[in-house]
Image (cartoon, rainbow, N blue to C red):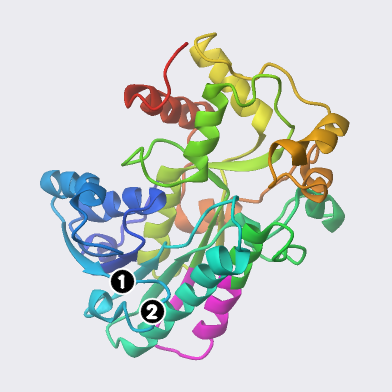
Amino acid sequence: MVISNRSTFMSPRQVMVSGATGYVAGWLIKRLLEAGHHVHAAVRDPANKQKLAHLEALQADLPGNITYFAADLLVEGSYAEAMADCEIVCHTASPFSLRVKDAQRELVDPAKLGTRNVLEQAKRTSSVRRVVVTSSYVAVFGDNADFLASGKPFLSEDDWNTTSSLTHQPYSFSKTEAEREAWKIAQTQDQWRLVTVNPAFVMGPGISPYATSESFNFMTQLADGTFKSGIPNFGVGLVDVREVADAHLGAAFIPEAEGRYLISAENSSFPEIAQILRDQFGDDFPFPKRIIPKALIWLIGPLIDKTLSRRVLARNVGYPVKIDNRKSIRELGITYRPLEETVTQMFQQLIDEGIVVPS
């Protein structure tokens, strides 16, 4: 990442990070500690030393420091202590799961109500000047077919997801509802500026490879034979977790940063990811070697995985998606690394940790 020579960027601040044990938050906290900031890490249970071990290891080696605070997304006022005296709030906490029984309770409530609780607390905390919310590119579109329907060459920060619901793409719906709630609250005050970071599908090595993430689940499935017989041709935007962390820093510290920022390195696909892994790691793992025809995956997909409804498959398999990342490059100074580096380093970490084992 290239940051302009702004002295304000490096001056130590107190920064609250919600969901501090998460995948994106790990790299964000590392960047903050490297710059000497004091991180107020909001977590569910500060007494759970095992979940905090990777953050403690960072603090031991870097100039910044961390203080832990207990907070619950669904409890109003629970972020008051963590946010006290902070100038910057980074709200990264939000559930990312595609396999839920009750979408309202498991996805929408934590995402929307959690955002409301954090931002309403920011309104009550006089020190706050900037709020950064981790949204997603799925708040821009719901299905890949939406991109073609738009008739645009790229999806940009001007677009919004209008096709997801509780029963169709509920995760995407939860992120859209949460971001809309954030902008609604931001318009009720003039104390702080809201900036949202909207990353594509996040990959890359984690500060902790055990952080809960669908990204790690997907990589594990590529290695364990889940897709041995073939992989559906899902088009995805992809981005390295380290660039997502850098985007949060830019959104937090660059005075002119405003609005939404789509963070996506490349317009890719599941088969391309599998090809990169085959090229780098050969036949040591049962990586998929062919693309499952759309008609076949449409027929059997729902029988294999309930999240693969026929509507999801019909509106996403075989459709590309193209993301316009120029605003992030121009205004946040993001330099995106090659996709091969992201995928290879992430998978190598899983090997090193014994999470995936060569056959």
Amino acid beneath label 2? Val
Circle 2 Cα neighbour tier, 10 Å, few/some/many (<14 / 14–19 / ≥20) = few
Above/below status of 122 relative to 6: below
Q: Secondary structure at mark 1?
A: loop
Above/below status of 359 relative to 165: above
Q: Which residue is mark 2?
A: 75
Query: Residue 183 magenta-drawn?
Result: yes
Q: Which residue is mark 1?
A: 71
Return the residue found at the far top.
283
Residue at image point 47% right, 62% down:
94
Is the residue under label 2 in contact with that under label 1 (CB below 8 Å)? yes
Q: Magenta stretch? A: 178-195
Nearer to us in this view, 203 or 98: 98
Nearer to us in this view, 39 or 283: 283
Residue 9's image quarter? Answer: bottom left
Provide residue 251's location: percent of width, then percent of height: 43, 63
Q: Relative to 197, is 52 on the left or the right?
A: left
Residue at image point 44% right, 44% down:
241
Nearer to us in this view, 283 or 128: 283
Amino acid beneath label 1? Ala
Residue 21's image quarter? Answer: bottom left
